[in-house]
Structure formats: C-alpha cells, structure tokens
Image: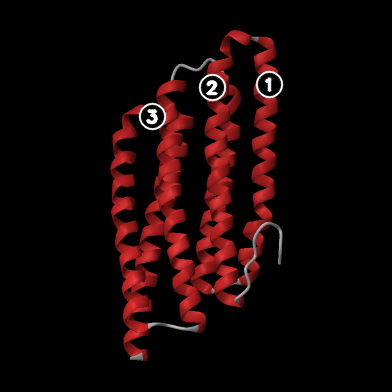
Amino acid sequence: MKIHLQRELDSLNKHLFHLSSLVENILEDAVQIITQNEGDRLDGIKAKDREIDRLEVEVEEECLKILALHQPVAVDLRFLIAALKMNNDFERIGDLAVNIAGAQRFLAASESRHLFTDHILKMGGMARSMFRKSLESLMSRDEEKAAQVMADDDEVDAYYYKLIEMVKEEIGRGPNQAEELIGWIMVAKHIERVADLATNIAEDTLYMVKGEIVRHGQG
C-alpha cells in the first residue's frame, strides 16, 4: 500500500510542477503584453488560462482520490493539504495574469505609458521570481528559500505603494487623465496579489515541512 501511495504522490508532484510551469509562463506573457502593448496576444493568454483551469481540476481530483484511497497521515497528509491549497493559488494567479494582460485594451493609448512600464516590468519580474522560488522551496522542501519568499513580499509591496504615489502626482498635474492613471494602479494591484499568492505557497511549504501554520506574521 505504501509503495502505491508513494507512486501516486510522485505523480501528483509532477502534475503540480507542470501546472506551475504553465502559470509562470502565463504570468511572464501577461507582463510583456501590458508593458510592450501587445494586444494581439490576448487570445493566446486566455487559451493558456483555460488550460490552467482544466489542469487545476485534474490535480484537485487526484488529491481527493489519494486521500480517499490511502488515508495518508503525517507528512504525506500535510503534503496533500498543501497541494490542494497551492493548486487553488495557481489557478488564481492564472486569472490575475489574464486581468493584467486584459488591461492592455484600456491602456493601449495611455499617454502615461512611458512613466509606468519600467516600474510594472520590475514589479512583475519580482513577483515571478517569488513564484519561482516558492516552487523551488516546495520541490526541495527548502525552509530557507520559503522564508526568503515571505521576506521578498515586502519589497513588492513597497513598489506597489511607490506606484500609487507616482499616480497621485500625475493626477495632480492632469486630473483629466485620472481614469487612465488609475488603470495602472489596478495592474500593479494584480501583480501585488500574485506576490501574496506566492507567499501563500511558501507558507504552505513551511507547513508541509514543519507541521506548523505560518500565517499573518506568525511563526
């Protein structure tokens, strides 16, 4: 029974890694679309999100099947609980990527584009780096890397609040552009949420390894 359980856990690990690779890819695409004004790629990113949605359902079904058939305990049970939560976070990041890319339609003719694209590009790169590190911490059960992801979240937050201040300054100069300028805040907010979800994955990794819930600044 233990051999069969381990085989299914190994298979689940591979499926999680495949899904996470797709999520990282769609996130990179989304940031490129909004910063490089590539509206012709929007249909492609929506297709990738549909594939992520499909795989998310498959992974959840796989987790539930293992729980029902093998009734795992200890670290195996914690892994499955963490996998279910991470799986949901992956799907949510895919949705956020669609939102980021979709803002291109609204901001395509933005007169302020040159003021914000570099900032968004850096924020997106940091969030994607956090996501990658959270996955590496998951796959290698690396507590230190998971803790680093949690620390990096503060830096992404700082970039987000800096962009808000930049937008406020621009609205002061030209109130007639307020609606467009707020669009850049929404893009930054979606990226900030990606960083939050990467932090969730890191917290779930620590739970899986240590058996302790680390959340809301605890632990």
Which of marks 1 and 3 precedes in the sequence?
Answer: 3
Kindly state the secondary structure of the residue where label 1 is placed: helix
Real-space Cα separation, disc 3 to disc 1, in angstroms: 26 Å
Q: In which image quadrant can residue 44 be found? A: top left
State the residue in front, 35 or 189.
189
Tell which tag, 3 or 1, sits nearer the viewer.
1
For marks 2 and 3, the one nearer the N-term is 3
Do residues under tags 2 and 3 come within 8 Å of each other at their CB atoms? no
Separation of disc 2 and disc 1 at Cα? 15 Å
Q: Position of residue 124 (x, y in %)?
A: 54, 42
Element class at badge 3: loop
Looking at the image, residue 96 lies above or below residue 79: above
Where residue 150 sits: x, y (%)? 65, 57
User: What's the residue at 52%, 39% (across, down)?
Assistant: 190
- The residue depicted at 31 percent of the width and 86 percent of the height is 4
Task: Provide the residue designation for mark 3.
Answer: 38
Q: Which mark is residue 168?
A: 1
Which amino acid type is marked by label 2?
A: Arg
Quadrant of the image occupied by residue 200: bottom right
